[in-house]
Amino acid sequence: MKILLVEDEKKVADFIKKGLTEEFYTVDAAPDGEEGLFMAENSEYDLMILDIMLPDINGIELCTKIRSTNIKTPIMMLTAVDATESKVKGLDSGADDYLTKPFVFDEFLARVRSLLRRPSLAADLLKAADVVLDPVKHEVLRGGRKIDLTWKEFALLEYMMRNRGRILSRTKIFENIWSYDIETSSNIVDVYISYLRDKIDKRHSQKLIHTIRGAGYILKEQ
């Protein structure tokens, strides 16, 4: 799943991003509200985490602007101000949850999981043929056998399963699985599709991941 983090304190942003990445989430980080708004409007996210004390556009204004564009993605607000008035303003602006800094990271992760489990995100088990993916436990089974995937392979498979039957271009896959700030080779999508095929399809006669020449890839049951 992909998360947008808007946090102007670099040390805090790096700490949160590292922790979320270790939990198999893909994270885009924006240092201010203006860049955060651009990213929110131009990419798809499963969750947005906004600090309230941001330069230019503050977190409450940013949340209001995001909601005004009819983006319904869950939003968590972060702030160093433990005041009821700030919490009320944050929630009234359209936020779904509120956490005061400093926080215990385990509690933060629990709140992230809670927001991602909401029915609108369809966070139940994903299935295609005999492949079962649990987005909460980060587990994948095929034919009842557990398959060990790296966090990036898992994110790629989850994205393809959520879009089962749709042709996904390399650009679309890259935008949803890799962060904005990553510098990587142009064939990174092809490389990871190959890794995934080796683990998901290699031992099975029924192949699920298919190449659509000149268009991209598709996960479907034949």
Image: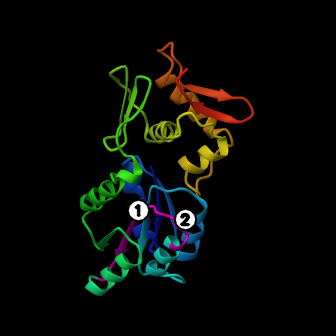
Question: Label 1 is placed on what type of residue?
Answer: Pro
Side of 190 where 54 appears, left or right: left
Neighbor class of circle 2 (other Cα within 10 Å; few <14, some 14-19, many 20+) is: many
Q: Nearer the viewer, residue 88 or 24?
A: 88
Residue at the farthest right position:
214
The residue indicated by pointer 1 is 74
Q: Which mark is residue 40?
A: 2
Q: Is residue 117 left or right of residue 72?
A: left
Amino acid on which the number 2 mark rests in the picture = Ala
Residue 214 placed where, x, y %?
75, 33
Query: Can you say whether 167 is above or below 179 in the image?
Result: above
Give SS at disc 2. helix
Q: Is residue 200 above or below residue 21?
A: above
Color encoding of the figure = rainbow
Residue 40, relative to residue 124: is it above or below?
A: below
Side of 140 relative to 198 (left or right): left
From the viewer's side, name the closer residue of 95 and 183: 95
Q: CA distance from mark 2 to mark 1?
A: 12 Å
Q: Is residue 71 magenta?
A: yes
Q: Considering only order in the chain, which callout, 1 or 2, is on the residue closer to the N terminus?
A: 2
Which contiguous range is marked in magenta? 68-81
* Secondary-structure class at tag 1: loop
Front in this rendered view, residue 144 or 162:
162
Name the residue at 62% across, 52% down: 183
- In x, y percent, where is residue 218? 60, 32
Residue 93, quarter of the rendered image: bottom left
Q: Position of residue 41 (x, y in %)?
A: 58, 65
Q: Residue at x 31, y 81 (%)?
A: 88
